[in-house]
Amino acid sequence: MILNRGDAVSAYWPLRDELDIRPLLNALHGEGLHCALPVVAGKAKPLVFRRWRPGDALVSASFGLAEPSADAPAVDPRALLIPLLAVDAVGNRLGYGAGYYDRTLAALRARGPVIAVGIAFEAQRVAALPVDGYDQKLDWLVTEQSVTRFGD
């Protein structure tokens, strides 16, 4: 899938030791993509993505997240840049345990093609992870050292 000007890409505002992708977020915006950040809509619900532009003020939210304000328009991303704790050799991702990205990816993929790109440090790679039936695989992984495509 190729992204075009005007397509939406979701990213994340880094927490703690997550890889800081804010420079990439700014570059994507500069290339004409609509950037968005995730908003937690409620327990056990898929994430909502709200439009973000450089300079937009963010509000503090649960889990220590920084989110766009409620008046920022919601968008459906065609690509998601996703943080993680660990990733295995076939694209299984270990997140923070609440299942938000798994529910979100399942909902988006049911509506059409979407690309899931894990963003991590190379040290977060592991040989294998436990997998449940609701877990959604990544399509790509980008680290500070490499880019990996999973699947066919």
Image (spheres, helix red, strand yellow):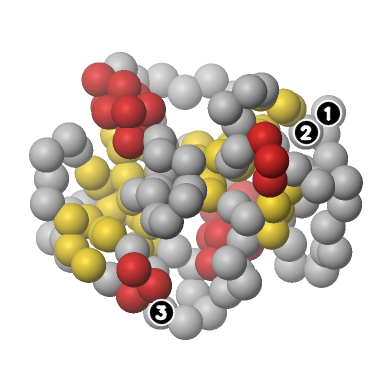
Q: Quadrant of the N terminus?
A: top right
137 versus 43 height, above or below: above
Q: Nearer the viewer, residue 59 or 138?
A: 59
Tell me the quarter of the image containing the C terminus: top right
Marks 2 and 3 close (CB-CB < 8 Å): no
Task: Give the distance between the C-alpha atoms of the residues marked 3 and 1, in whole angstroms.
Answer: 34 Å
The image quarter in which residue 30 lies? top left
Look at label 1 and name its amino acid: Asp
Whole-percent x and y of residue 48? 38, 61
Task: Find disc 2 in the rendering and name its residue.
Answer: 150
Q: Is residue 134 visible?
A: yes
Q: Quadrant of residue 94?
A: bottom right
Residue at mark 2 to residue at mark 3: CA–CA distance: 30 Å
Q: Nearer the viewer, residue 61 or 151?
A: 61
Which residue is disc 1 drawn over?
152
Counting other residues with Cα less than 10 Å from the Cα at mark 3, is it few (<14), some (14-19), or many (20 or more)? few
**Label 1 near label 2: C-beta < 8 Å?**
no
Give the secondary structure at mark 3. Answer: loop
State left or right for residue 148 relative to residue 116: right
Position of 1 relative to 79 (above/below): above
Q: Nearer the viewer, mark 2 or mark 1?
A: 2
Q: Earlier in the sequence, mark 3 or mark 1?
A: 3
Could you say where residue 114 lies in the image, as x and y percent from the top left?
Answer: 57, 40
Q: Which residue is mark 3?
A: 42
Name the residue type under label 2. Phe
